[in-house]
Amino acid sequence: MKQDELLVRLRGFEWNDFECKKASRGVPDDAYKTVAAFANTAGGWLVFGVSEHNGQLEVTGVDEPDRVQNDFLSTLRSGQKLNQIIRVEEQRYSIDGKTVFTFHVPESPRFDKPIYLKGDPRQTYIRRGAGDEQCTARELGRFLRDHDTQSFDGELLADLDVQRCFDEDTVRWYKAQFLLRNPDQSDIADPVAFLHHWNYVTEHQGQMLPSRAGVLLFGKRQYVEQLLPRPVLDYQRIDTAFDNWSADQRWHDRYVFEENIFSTWRGLVARYMRIAEHPFSLDPATLRRNDDPPDYVAFREAAINLLVHQDYGDPGRKAAIKLFTDRTVFWNPGDAFPSTAALLEPTEKDVRNPALIKAFRRIGLSDQAGTGIRAIFRNWHELGRVPPQIRNDKASKEFELVLVNKPLLTVAMQQFRQSLGVDLSPEQADALALGLEKPAGESLSLTDIRGLGFSTTQQAKALADRLVAQNLLEPQSETRFQVPESIRQRFDLETAQVTEQVGTKSGPSEDQVRTWSQLTAEQQGLLTKMHAEHTITELMDWVKRVNRTKFRDQCLTPLLEQGLVTMTIPDKPQSSKQRYRLTERGTALLAGQHTQDKTPHERPV
């Protein structure tokens, strides 16, 4: 952390990655709790020489800096106060003549956790908000499961009979998918022998034993329930927007999957097909759509990510998929071991359930190792939508992925881009739109920018630097940026000026002229031909579009957002009986354009 960045943080408050201690003449004992909490979660900055006074952070300085620094670092390196040696990066600064230390505590590797004090695992701490919290017994158990070098899904189950615990229909289905994808492989007729070949059954001391992964993937329901005392997945379809929903409202379709993982996957696909935007066919070998539209790729990868990475040793929390009208939320018990930034790297990742993952990859139901999250982001970006949101909570050990069905470049943003008077590339426009999408005061990180489809951090940094040079972003640190307040205010003002004006007989209003000129040729063509209620297929035929998703995002949704077109069944946007028609504003805009197109002597006076 550079001194300028530190000064910015000191104007704020302590939070989950930032903690200050007075440490005037010695190291406070609770500093080691903070070290343990940072190491057990996502890391953070510990600052000595700063006190809190009346809710404000104040530089008070370290009076005996050499002794405080040496005592602290030697204790961390001794492995006595904490059960693991903690290596921190330290910096010493002079602020107003007072000595301040910053120590960056990295997140500890999975197999080093939990980090605890005084040789007592019960003194394990995690970081939540601005506090260091002692782990509950259940939270400690999650750490210990992830700490085990023997993967949880690879454990052998001595109390189950291999001849009785597997569901033969699931094994037959899996074998069929495998042989279609691998025609050179010989068929192993016996189900147990087939599973033994792939190590889901193992010979141990003369006895054939199923693995935990084998039963979770292929087991009969009664044995899955015996092994897992909670559902595999809770699927809910909620026909309302996320912001309009509360937990006490009832879902519109729900299914709690308690069968094996592959049966769960097949049932989930069947439910997804019912509500997909339009009919499609599936490749029987991979269950991939033959026309491979981005929306299904993103859903497939997110759903499989949920099934293979969750903590199946957690008895009290079940995975959930909630489909709202404007987003889909995937929630998992169990955090991802890498950071969010690392998830976007095209490298092999440390995973919780390697045997489950291999089973899906073997039949082509998951992308190459380390590319699943990248595929989700890439396909969502191809749709022109706001990047997926990831919340990888290492304190609560939970993972959430949200696919927001919202265009990144809205009509308002497109109009604002044209008014800026600077030449923005599509990538730069996307990054600026993402910055404006953030709430005021929230920064835009290089990881956020990478979510727009950039392969490397260096590419994201070059783009951010270009926007800084154009005064459209301002740096907060080397990795974080913010839209200047003047740009944000200008955007808000111009967006608010879009009104519902209508034309007059003497000609189109200024608003109508501006609105019409900012429509694409396709959008103008659609409005010109709309004289009744029309299906989306009719509209696509008029502009010779074949990809329904791209047509919605690029042509139809902007017209809906501007209030020029409306749905005939607005509360059921995915209804097969859905039609589209002009609104009063759309009719007035079209009438005004017709007036504008007439010669002067044809226009009424």
Image (cartoon, rainbow, N blue to C red):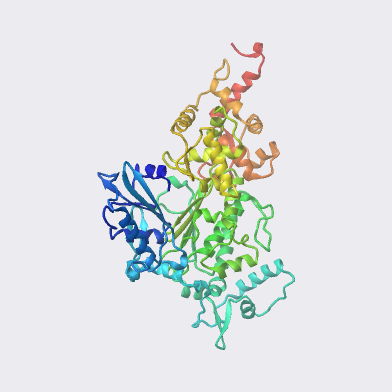
Pick the residue in front: 295 or 244: 295
Query: Could you say where residue 332 lies in the image, as x and y percent from the top left?
Result: 47, 60
**Residue farthest to the right, as pictured:** 184
Residue 236, visible in the rendered structure = no
Query: Could you say where residue 457 lies in the image, as x and y percent from the top left?
Result: 56, 48
- Quarter of the image for residue 95 reads top left
Query: Could you say where residue 151 lies in the image, as x and y percent from the top left?
Result: 51, 72
Pick the residue in front: 246 or 124: 124
Query: Could you say where residue 63 lies in the image, as x and y percent from the top left?
Result: 27, 51
Report the quarter where the C terminus lies: top right
**Residue farthest to the bottom, as pictured:** 206
> Which residue is drawn at the image coordinates 61% and 54% (left, top)?
297
> Which residue is drawn at the image coordinates 58% and 57% (left, top)?
372
The relative height of residue 357 versus residue 223 in the rendered view (above or below) is above
Quick check: 60 left or right of 469?
left
> Which residue is drawn at the image coordinates 51% and 66% (left, top)?
352
Pick the residue in front: 259 or 479: 479
> Which residue is drawn at the image coordinates 66% and 42% (left, top)?
537
Residue 480, visible in the rendered structure = yes
- Quarter of the image for residue 11 reads top left
Quick check: 517 left or right of 475?
right
**Residue farthest to the front, as pictured:** 66
Quick check: 526 left or right of 32?
right
Pick the residue in front: 51 or 285: 51
Counting labels gives: 0
The relative height of residue 483 versus residue 452 in the rendered view (above or below) is above
**Residue farthest to the left, as pictured:** 54
